[in-house]
């Protein structure tokens, strides 16, 4: 199986290769959650460059879940025309569009982004400093409904699927964490900690027809903002999500070359592949730059590979690896070089403020 082999989901939808654009925070859209021309151009350029699946940035299902300025939203029906415009642009390039739907939970910043609305961040547990309140049962049900409504809006707009963002320590991951010690059936024991993610997945699945793709992104183990996660629990979560109607599981590995923390002699991809039914697509992401690195993940058992930073720098990465006369560009790039790759000034500023990405050369200004 090669990177350019078509990928067929178990509902019959086919992507023309196994290379995905990973969901990327970019802060390119408008304060009201509507789509900007800059964000559209960024995503369409990657579809034109040969990626068969284009995932949007994490798009919030509710105003109280918004986490960054300039974040594309999917929380209101007024945004459906924007998603239709984006879906059409991606489809004209022969690619599939998936909306990554999420709620920031304790990482959301609605109090600063929407100061007149009196919105406070909430999560499974209240924070010690009082910034985050504990979720009420009404909050939890609103989130489940919000994920279902977001999936329905994406389908109405002509997108091909959604990915529920259960990775990186946002709301769904906060409930998954062992830090969640709620005693009302939504925390403490493992099954209760998975309940919000599972019910949101089932609700999203029920809101759309069978030919619409539902996926979930997971952090397999604790890393960065994702805390309180156990690998064996994550494997069981993936199994349950497949039962709940997920067509794919996307594991975010940060560095896909590394083995697991819990089992240092084992790579996570074979473990997830063994845990999942054969017809559930397994996607892996994590600092992949070369064709050999991507192919290695397929050889380990992944069905597709999602690229983030490499796709920012190389919007035509799939075409480049198929042409021996072309090479993969490595960062850092000047702002002028990034502008030519459909990376807007707003995204360049975000990348510059995130030095661990190492993408923008500091000695130049757009």
Image (tube, rainbow, N blue to C red):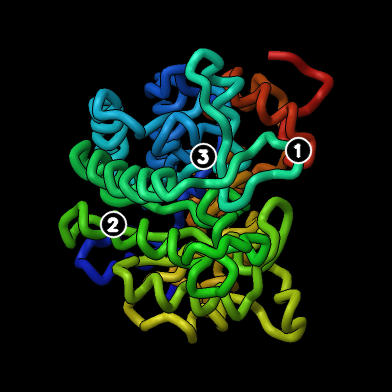
The answer to whether residue 224 shows anywhere in this view is yes
- The CA span between labels 3 and 1 is 42 Å
| Residue 241 position within the rendered picture, expressed as x and y whole percent measured from the top left | 39, 70
Looking at the image, which is closer to me, 213 or 323? 213
Closer to us: mark 3 or mark 1? 1
Mark nearer the N terminus (3 vs 1): 1
**Residue annotated with mark 1:** 129
Residue 129 location (% of width, % of height)? 75, 38
Residue 315 shows which numbered tag?
Answer: 3
**Would you name the residue on which mark 2 appears?**
203
Q: Position of residue 155 (x, y in %)?
A: 22, 44
- Estimate how packed mark 2 is, as few (under 14), some (14 to 19) or many (20 or more) residues with alpha carbons within 10 Å: many
Q: Secondary structure at mark 1?
A: loop
Q: Nearer the viewer, residue 360 or 243?
A: 243
User: Looking at the image, is mark 2 or mark 3 nearer the viewer?
Assistant: 2
- The disc, 2 or 3, on the residue closer to the chain's N-terminal end is 2
Residue 6 appears in which quarter of the rendering?
A: bottom left
Picture layout, residue 254 above or below residue 86:
below
Circles 1 and 2: CB atoms closer than 8 Å: no
């Amino acid at each position: 199986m090669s990177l350019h082999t078509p990928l067929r989901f178990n509902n019959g939808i086919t992507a023309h290769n196994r290379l995905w654009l990973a969901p990327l925070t970019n802060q390119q859209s408008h304060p009201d959650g509507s789509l900007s021309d800059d964000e559209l151009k960024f995503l369409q350029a990657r579809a034109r460059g040969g990626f068969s699946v284009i995932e949007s940035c994490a798009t919030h299902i509710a105003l109280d879940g918004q986490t960054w300025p300039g974040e594309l939203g999917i929380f209101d029906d007024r945004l459906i025309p924007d998603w239709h415009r984006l879906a059409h642009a991606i489809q004209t390039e022969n690619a599939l569009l998936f909306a990554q739907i999420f709620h920031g939970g304790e990482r959301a910043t609605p109090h600063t982004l929407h100061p007149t609305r009196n919105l406070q961040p909430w999560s499974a547990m209240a924070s010690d400093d009082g910034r985050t309140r504990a979720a009420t049962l009404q909050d939890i049900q609103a989130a489940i409904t919000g994920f279902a409504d977001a999936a329905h809006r994406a389908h109405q707009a002509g997108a091909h699927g959604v990915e529920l963002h259960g990775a990186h320590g946002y709301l769904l991951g906060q409930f998954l964490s062992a830090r969640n010690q709620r005693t009302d059936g939504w925390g403490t024991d493992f099954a209760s900690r998975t309940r919000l993610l599972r019910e949101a997945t089932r609700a999203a699945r029920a809101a759309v027809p069978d030919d619409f793709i539902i996926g979930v992104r997971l952090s397999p183990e604790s890393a960065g903002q994702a805390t309180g996660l156990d690998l064996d629990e994550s494997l069981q979560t993936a199994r349950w999500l497949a039962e709940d109607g997920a067509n794919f599981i996307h594991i975010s590995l940060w560095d896909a070359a590394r083995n697991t923390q819990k089992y240092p002699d084992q790579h996570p991809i074979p473990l997830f592949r063994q845990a999942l039914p054969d017809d559930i697509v397994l996607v892996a992401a994590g600092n992949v730059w070369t064709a050999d690195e991507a192919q290695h993940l397929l050889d380990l058992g992944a069905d597709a590979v999602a690229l983030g930073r490499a796709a920012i720098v190389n919007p035509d990465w799939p075409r480049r690896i198929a042409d021996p006369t072309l090479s993969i560009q490595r960062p850092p790039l000047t702002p002028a070089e990034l502008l030519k790759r459909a990376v807007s000034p707003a995204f360049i500023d975000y990348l510059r403020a995130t030095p661990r990405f190492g993408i923008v050369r500091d000695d130049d200004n757009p």
